[in-house]
Image (tube, rainbow, N blue to C red):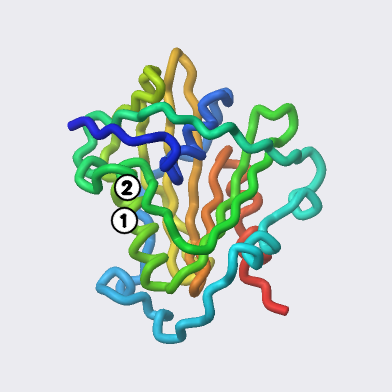
Amino acid sequence: MRVRVATTALGITAALLALLALPACSTDTTGAKHQTPASARAGEPTDAVHKPAELSSAALESRLLDQSDLGSGYLPKPDRPTRHDYVTVIDCPALSELGGDAATGGTLTFPHKAKAAFTYGDSSSEISEELYSDTANKLSAGIGRIFDAMTGCPTYQLVAGGTPIDITTQKLPAPQRLGNQQWSQLLTFSSAGRSTVVKQTAIRDGNLLLIVSGAPALVDRHLGKALAKATATG
């Protein structure tokens, strides 16, 4: 089945497609399902009863990692111009069933959000951080549905602006020691003889959702630091 969606609403996948210009990265490919507490899988997240206040976009912005947090060698990545091409999703029923924007991650329309992206070294490696805030239930359901759909097909294809992109997905062990719920996946993008490996890990902590994407080594290096700053109080 083919689903056509505008690239202006790609959400998670848009950030990943932007990394296609990078050279291939290597990482551990030992797969496992993303980890979610059994009580949360059965229904409401166990911490949802606390219902902490949602954070504003301005508050989220102040909790993003910056150059001083990352260390030397990191530079802010300029925003890419908005594109109006169409993307076709091919041979992935799990994505197609969500339909429209959701098929490529466009359902991350939480009311409060902030994002930062950086290049490292000679700009061949990148890392991006996204923060969202909403109720625990909405964050859990939204990101869980996206990750389940994106990893529902081991292989599928996107055609972006006429360019075919072969994608393989693999669930990875999630860092259970962090936050209330965790998801992690490895994506390999192949196009025009080049391959790019992207790791993406999402952590929900109460009413806050953190997503770190990019070169696997950089994600592993900065994930804990990003969560610590995002959830710091006082």
Between 61 and 188, the one nearer to me in the picture: 61
Q: Please say if 56 is above or below 31.
A: below
Q: Nearer the viewer, mark 1 or mark 2?
A: 2
Residue that carries the numbered disc 2 in the rendered image: 102
Rendered location of residue 103, percent (x, y): 30, 43
Q: Residue at x 43, y 66 (%)?
A: 181
Please provide percent x and percent y for residue 191: 43, 19
Please identify the quadrant where the N terminus is shown.
Answer: top left
In what element is the residue under mark 1? helix
- Asked if residue 76 lies left or right of residue 26, the reply is right
Would you place residue 234 above or below residue 174 in this image?
below
Asked whether disc 1 touches disc 2, contact meaning CB atoms under 8 Å apart, the reply is yes
Q: Earlier in the sequence, mark 1 or mark 2?
A: 2
Q: Residues within 10 Å of mark 2 (few under 14, many from 20)?
A: many
How many discs mark residues in the rendered view? Answer: 2
Residue 143 image offset from top left, x and y in percent? 39, 57
When asked about the image quadrant of residue 118, the answer is top right
Dot 2 amino acid type: Ala
Percent coordinates x, y for residue 22 in the rendering: 58, 26
Against 135, residue 52 (above or below) is below
**Residue in front for this viewpoint, 79 or 118:** 79
Q: Which mark is residue 145?
A: 1
Give SS at disc 2. Answer: helix
Q: Is residue 94 left or right of residue 104?
A: left
Residue 166, quarter of picture: top left
Q: Is residue 81 among what the camera can see?
A: yes
User: Looking at the image, which residue is at 29% across and 37% down?
Assistant: 154
Q: Could you tell me which residue is drawn at 39 percent across and 47 percent down?
A: 106
Q: Residue at x 35, y 29 (%)?
A: 87
Q: Report the Cα–Cα distance between label 1 and label 2.
A: 9 Å
Vertical relation: 67 (above or below) 113? above
